[in-house]
Image (tube, rainbow, N blue to C red):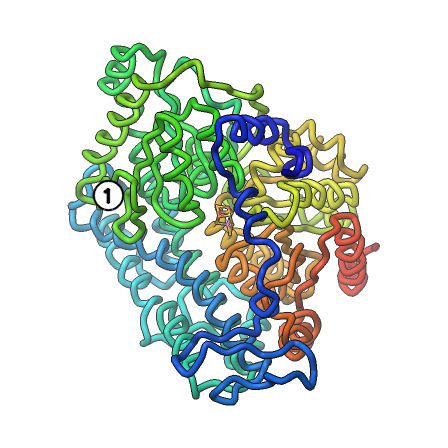
Amino acid sequence: LKPPQELSIWEDAQKMIEKARRDGVETVWDRYEQQSPHCTFCELGLTCKNCNMGPCRISPKEGGKMQRGVCGADAHVIVARNFGRFVAGGAAGHSDHGRDLIEVLEAIVEGKAPGYQISDEAKLRRVSAELGINVDGRDVMDVARDLMDICYADFGSRKKEVGFTCRVPEKRKEIWRKLGIMPRGVDREIAEMMHRTHMGCDNDAPNTLLHAARTSLADGWAGSMIGTELSDIIFGTPAPSASRANLGVLKADHVNLLVHGHNPVVSEMVLAAAREPEMIAKAKAAGAAGINIGGLCCTGNELLMRQGIPMAGNHLMTELAIVTGAVDAMVVDYQCIMPSLVQTAACYHTKFITTADKAKFTGATHVSFHPDNAVKQARVVVEMAIEAYERRDQGRVEIPCEPVDITTGFSIEALLSALGGTLDPVLDAVKAGKIRGFTAIVGCNNPRIKHDSANVGLAKALIKKDILVLATGCVTTAAGKAGLLMPEGASMAGPGLQEVCGALGIPPVLHMGSCVDNSRVIQLCAAIANALGVDISDLPVWGASPEWYSEKAVAIGLYCVASGIPVQIGTPPHITGSDVVTNLALSGLEDLVGAAFLVEADPEKAADIMDERIKAKRKALGLSE
Ligand code: NFS
């Protein structure tokens, strides 16, 4: 077994890995070892299971025995097909989440969603007007109904261009139209990807990849963006606030209930129930000092952004949170929830509760959430946590550290209002070279990489170069634990960024939300490009996902690249069995959409390469390097 110090950079993780070993609990790192070495064919993307003449695999060696599958598909076609379906999976995840928000909005409009409401009417009107809905003097519910219809239509087949492309610079849209990758409808692009990758359809790797780009654009500019905007409208648009992070947010004397997954539709209701005086009284009657809600992964980010709820951990911390012995219940919806959590929870007193009918876990307790019953079901969940607390063995509890302070809540609206209503102060800082560029560091953890080493390493390397970092998803907790989400963290930045952070009182890394909220990042880039009268690909910006693991992360990476934002990743996807596909990803896309992928695991080296491009982009804009 590897020493815990080699698996994660964090003290709370290392201590809990040790405790897991003492308690005889298996973790993701144990299973990673058992699975290593991984299948080489699969790693290279050279296996195909799309039909029953197979499965097939292509020899990675040129001139090897198996150069084509039974149907005749070569390495390039197979790799491209696999990659296309990978992207479709990710786009489907974000977008189905977005659709769930439309369904809540629909239920609100129909008066069938007690507990949910329009919390930000001004944003409802603003977004609706952007999408061409008449808002003047109209009743809020009438506007909401029209917005709901327009959002549903973005999932269908009747549009030529999805609604939020109204935010995209004209030059960018011309590129998309010319390449035939303008996103038309979320479900349409995903379904077409499944069709194209059926045996006997799209057998030209670059053509398949272009549709992968289109599918990802439907995610970024429709599915995810709808998810973000409707979440803000229903639960409130985030504003800067203070919170805390790491396993130290658990409280030994409280009922600890962790929310995990993605959709605020569930976690917001659980939080509301936990705040009801009646529930708090029940917790006290059970001997607890109160009810403590903490977040994991992206639904944690949603509650952190809007409600300041503390963050217990990111992806690789989810099992370890239970290992503390202090978690009474973990309530989940969907995505990024390790199936192993059922077994981890069973090793302690922890109640593991699922809520989405489309994401059941064998062995879990299922409490089915819908807009019409969410208030009631949320109380059921909180009561289960209180009951579990009564069974907790305090002798097995170990909370490994003190929490660290973080700041959160930097929605575009919050940024604008902090800046006095316009982007000008930031643009001036960019022009003066105090902020030399921007990078959004997003996404996951992956046991292939020492937990959070690359997420934190890249953020630190970039801010040192006066590159402002935006964080979403699991990178948030990493940045927070490293002290980068506090204004004091600016002491780790270069002199220019330090000055700007000092003047504005902001941290060098700004938390912009969950992974679905990467739509805020592309919207911000589009707004800056529009303000400067240039294309997004002309900006000194990057995306990065140093420790990515999921299909969703690749969908995000690809919609950033297709939008003109180059993206660093720490490990390649399973495409390296095809030089055609690999070269397209690493350089060919640059000619087509003005951005491409960079695969570089070393954060310092990655930061240097990213810096070179930022210099070049600044120069082209007539700015100092
Ligand atoms: Ni996004 Fe990665 Fe998952 Fe969120 Fe975390 S693992 S792709 S950051 S929780 S979606």
Q: Kindly identify the residue that appears in the image at 65 percent across and 70 percent down.
A: 576
Residue 272: x and y, percent?
30, 29
Numbered label tally:
1
Residue 257: x and y, percent?
37, 28
Which residue was labeled with disc 1?
369
Q: Kindly identify the residue that appears in the image at 38 percent across and 67 percent down.
A: 186
What amino acid type should be assigned to the residue bearing mark 1? Phe
* Residue 360 in view (yes/no): yes
From the viewer's perspective, tell me whether residue 324 is left or right of residue 483: left
Q: Quadrant of the N terminus?
A: top right
Q: Residues within 10 Å of mark 1 (few under 14, many from 20)?
A: many
In the rendered image, which quarter is residue 389 located in?
A: top left
From the viewer's perspective, tell me whether residue 238 is left or right of residue 13: left
Q: Quadrant of the C terminus?
A: bottom right
In the rendered image, which quarter is residue 623 located in?
A: bottom right
Q: Is residue 491 above or below residue 580?
A: above
Q: Is residue 435 above or below residue 173?
A: above
Dot 1 falls on a residue whose secondary structure is loop
Residue 480: x and y, percent?
60, 33
Front-lying residue, 318 or 466: 318
Front-lying residue, 308 or 291: 291
* Residue 209 in view (yes/no): no
Residue 365: x and y, percent?
26, 38
Q: Kindly identify the residue that appears in the image at 56 percent across and 42 percent down.
A: 29
- Mark 1 lies within 8 Å of ligand 1 (Cβ measured): no
Front-lying residue, 290 or 222: 290
